[in-house]
Image (cartoon, helix red, strand yellow):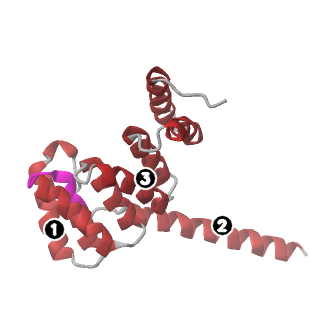
């Protein structure tokens, strides 16, 4: 027997997912979104929420799949465009990410997130002069967002630093084990 989930249950799942997200229980968040998506595979809020969790878990290409599903039905969805652009950028697909940020800026020429994303693309690809132009626009159009000005500490730089620390710790542990024999 197939059970159909009511709108009330979907709303409850969404609320529970949001609460779990605030508590950083991402595995539980995914369960609630999955329950919705089993019944309604194109549910926009569940797809966007699941994509955010995938991004948090560094499953960037999985996030892109969910953003693409939203964009199939709503090609101008700002949240999906920004999310897809960020996920692609963090996967080093800069050429594919840039059109997402350009589309956001095309929809609203004063969208600070679109400008900031575009600035990050230029920063990651080594064009710091162009990055500065787009960062300054982001700061101009979204002063309340507290964007860092030129030369932010990119997320990828932080992640790579953490990876290096773990690698150094692993080498030290191996050396200590080898010395003990």
Q: Is residue 110 left or right of 40 when viewed as pictured?
A: left
Q: Is residue 137 left or right of 146 when viewed as pictured?
A: left
- Residue carrying label 3: 66
- Confirm or deny contact between disc 3 and disc 1 (CB under 8 A): no
Q: What stretch is highlighted in magenta?
A: 108-117
- Confirm or deny contact between disc 1 and disc 2 (CB under 8 A): no
Question: Could you tell me residue 21's position as x and y percent?
Answer: 48, 36
Q: Is residue 141 visible?
A: yes
**Depicted 120 relative to depicted 1: above or below:** below
- Residue carrying label 1: 132
Quarter containing the N terminus: top right
Question: Could you tell me residue 40's position as x and y percent?
Answer: 47, 38
Q: Secondary structure beneath disc 1?
A: helix
Dot 1: within a 10 Å radius of its alpha carbon, few (fewer than 14), some, or many (20 or more) residues? Answer: some
Work out whether mark 3 precedes mark 1 in sequence or the reverse, and give the earlier one: 3
Quick check: is 29 in the magenta stretch? no
Q: Looking at this view, name the residue that lies furthest to the top.
A: 8
Work out whether mark 1 precedes mark 2 in sequence or the reverse, and give the earlier one: 1
- Residue carrying label 2: 169
């Amino acid at each position: 027997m197939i059970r159909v989930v009511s709108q009330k249950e979907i709303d409850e799942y969404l609320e529970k997912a949001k609460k779990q997200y605030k508590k950083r229980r991402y595995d539980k968040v995914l369960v609630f979104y999955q329950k919705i998506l089993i019944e309604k595979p194109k549910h926009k809020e569940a797809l966007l929420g699941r994509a955010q969790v995938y991004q948090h878990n560094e499953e960037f290409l999985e996030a892109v799949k969910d953003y693409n599903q939203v964009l199939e039905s709503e090609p101008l969805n700002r949240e999906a465009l920004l999310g897809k652009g960020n996920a692609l950028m963090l996967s080093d697909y800069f050429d594919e990410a840039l059109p997402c940020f350009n589309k956001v800026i095309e929809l609203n020429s004063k969208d600070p997130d679109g400008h900031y994303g575009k600035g990050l693309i230029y920063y990651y690809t080594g064009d710091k002069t162009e990055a500065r132009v787009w960062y300054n626009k982001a700061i101009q159009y979204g002063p309340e967002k507290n964007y860092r000005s030129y030369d932010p500490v990119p997320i990828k730089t932080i992640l790579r630093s953490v990876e290096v620390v773990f690698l150094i710790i692993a080498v030290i542990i191996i050396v200590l084990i080898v010395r003990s024999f």
